[in-house]
Image: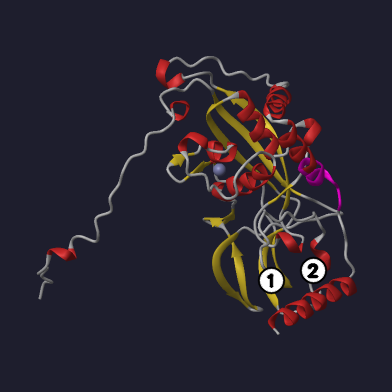
C-alpha cells in the first residue's frame, strides 16, 4: 500500500527565520581590488632523526590480522590529505600569529579578526582554500601501536606540540594502546592554495602562517597524534601565481607574475608592520617558539613516569 501523507506537517520540518545581514563595505565581494592567485605548495613529512609519520584519520575503524586500527584518509587507494585538514592546521597557527579570536568566534561583521576575514567564519566565506593534497610517489604506510589519546581539561587557548621522534611512543608500554595507520616518511604531498581579494598584508599573514618566509621558517603539525610524535610537516612554496586585480570583473587576465622572489618577504613585512607594538611582540614571541628546534626525546622511563604522575593527579582530582 502506498504511504499516504495525511498531514501537512510531514512535508514541513520547521520554518527557520533567516535574516540576511548587511556586510561591511570592505567585505563585499564585488569590490575585488586585492590580490588573486594561487600557491603551489609542497608538504613534506619530517625525516630522520626526527622522523614523523602522518596520521590523517578517515574516521573509519578497519580490521587486519592484528586487530582493529584507525585508517588514514584515502582517495581511491591513495592516502591523501583533505584540503580542509590543511586549512584547519594553517588556521591554528595563524590564530597564534595575529590578533585573532579562537576557532572563528567573530560574529560582528564590522569587526572580524584577521583569521576570520581570511579563513571565514559563520556567515562569512573565507578567501583562502586548499585542494586535496596528493602524493608525488608511492607511499608506505604502517600501523603503529601508540598509547591511546588522553583527555585532560583545556585551560583555554591552544596547544602546540614539540616536534618529536615518534619512536619513543611506539611500544612504550604505557596505558592502553590504539593502532593508528600512518604514512611513513619520506613522503611529499602537493596541494594548491587558492586565494582571492587579499591585501598585501593578508597574503603576508598567509605566508607567515604556513611557515615559509625565509626569516620566519617553521614546521607545522598536521593530523592526529600530534602529542605522540606524529604529524610534523614542512611546507614550502613551489610556485606563486598572481592573476591580477579584479580579473572577473574586467574579464582580462594580466600575465601571471612568475618572478615572485621578493613577494613573500615584502608581504610578510607589510603584515608585521601593520601590527601594533604589543601585537607584534606577542606574534614574535610565538614565532620564536614555533621556530625553536626543540626536539626532545624522552626515555621510556621518563614517559612512564609522566603517565603515572598524571594518573595520580587525575585520581587526586576525582577524590
Ligand atoms: Zn575571528
| Residue 310 visible in the snapshot | yes
Q: Position of residue 158 (x, y in %)?
A: 68, 54
Give 273 or 134, whichever is nearer the viewer: 273
Q: Quadrant of the N terminus?
A: bottom left
What residue is shown with label 2? 169
Magenta-drawn stretch contains 290 = yes
Q: Position of residue 165 (x, y in %)?
A: 82, 59
Q: Residue at x 66, y 70 (%)?
A: 151
Give how far apart the Cα atoms at labels 1 and 2 are.
14 Å
Q: Is residue 99 left or right of residue 12?
A: right
What residue is shown with label 1? 150
Is 12 situated above or below 112?
below
Residue range of the region highlighted in magenta in the rendering: 286-294
Give 263 or 47, whichever is nearer the viewer: 263
Circle 1 — which element? Answer: loop
Q: Residue at x 17, y 65 (%)?
A: 9
> Is label 1 in contact with label 2 (beta carbons under 8 Å)?
no
| Residue 127 visible in the snapshot | no
Circle 2 — which element? Answer: helix
Amino acid at each position: 500500500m502506498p504511504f499516504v501523507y495525511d498531514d501537512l506537517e510531514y512535508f514541513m520540518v520547521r520554518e527557520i527565520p533567516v535574516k540576511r545581514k548587511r556586510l561591511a563595505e570592505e567585505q563585499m565581494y564585488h569590490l575585488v581590488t586585492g590580490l588573486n592567485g594561487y600557491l603551489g605548495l609542497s608538504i613534506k613529512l619530517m625525516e630522520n632523526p626526527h622522523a614523523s609519520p602522518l596520521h590523517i584519520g578517515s574516521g573509519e575503524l578497519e580490521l587486519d590480522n592484528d586487530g582493529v586500527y584507525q585508517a588514514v584518509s584515502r582517495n581511491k587507494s591513495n592516502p591523501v590529505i583533505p584540503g580542509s585538514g590543511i586549512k584547519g592546521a594553517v588556521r591554528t597557527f595563524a590564530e597564534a600569529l595575529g590578533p585573532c579570536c579562537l576557532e572563528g568566534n567573530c560574529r560582528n561583521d564590522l569587526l572580524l579578526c584577521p583569521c576570520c576575514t581570511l579563513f571565514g567564519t559563520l556567515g562569512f566565506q573565507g578567501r583562502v582554500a586548499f585542494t586535496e593534497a596528493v602524493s608525488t610517489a608511492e607511499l608506505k604506510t604502517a600501523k603503529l601501536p601508540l598509547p591511546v589519546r588522553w583527555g585532560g581539561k583545556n585551560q583555554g587557548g591552544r596547544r602546540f606540540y614539540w616536534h618529536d621522534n615518534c619512536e619513543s611512543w611506539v611500544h612504550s608500554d604505557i596505558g592502553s594502546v590504539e593502532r593508528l595507520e600512518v604514512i611513513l616518511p619520506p613522503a611529499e604531498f602537493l596541494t594548491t592554495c587558492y586565494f582571492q581579494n587579499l591585501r598585501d598584508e593578508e597574503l603576508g599573514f598567509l605566508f607567515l602562517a604556513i611557515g615559509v618566509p625565509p626569516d620566519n621558517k617553521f614546521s607545522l603539525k598536521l593530523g592526529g597524534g600530534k602529542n605522540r610524535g606524529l604529524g610534523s610537516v614542512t611546507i614550502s612554496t613551489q610556485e606563486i601565481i598572481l592573476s591580477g586585480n579584479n580579473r572577473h570583473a574586467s574579464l582580462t587576465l594580466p600575465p601571471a607574475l612568475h618572478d615572485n622572489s621578493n613577494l613573500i618577504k615584502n608581504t610578510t613585512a607589510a603584515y608585521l608592520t601593520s601590527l601594533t607594538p604589543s601585537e607584534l611582540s606577542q606574534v614574535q614571541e610565538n614565532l620564536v617558539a614555533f621556530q625553536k628546534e626543540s626536539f626532545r626525546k624522552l626515555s621510556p622511563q621518563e614517559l612512564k613516569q609522566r603517565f603515572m604522575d598524571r594518573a595520580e593527579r587525575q585520581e587526586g582530582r576525582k577524590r
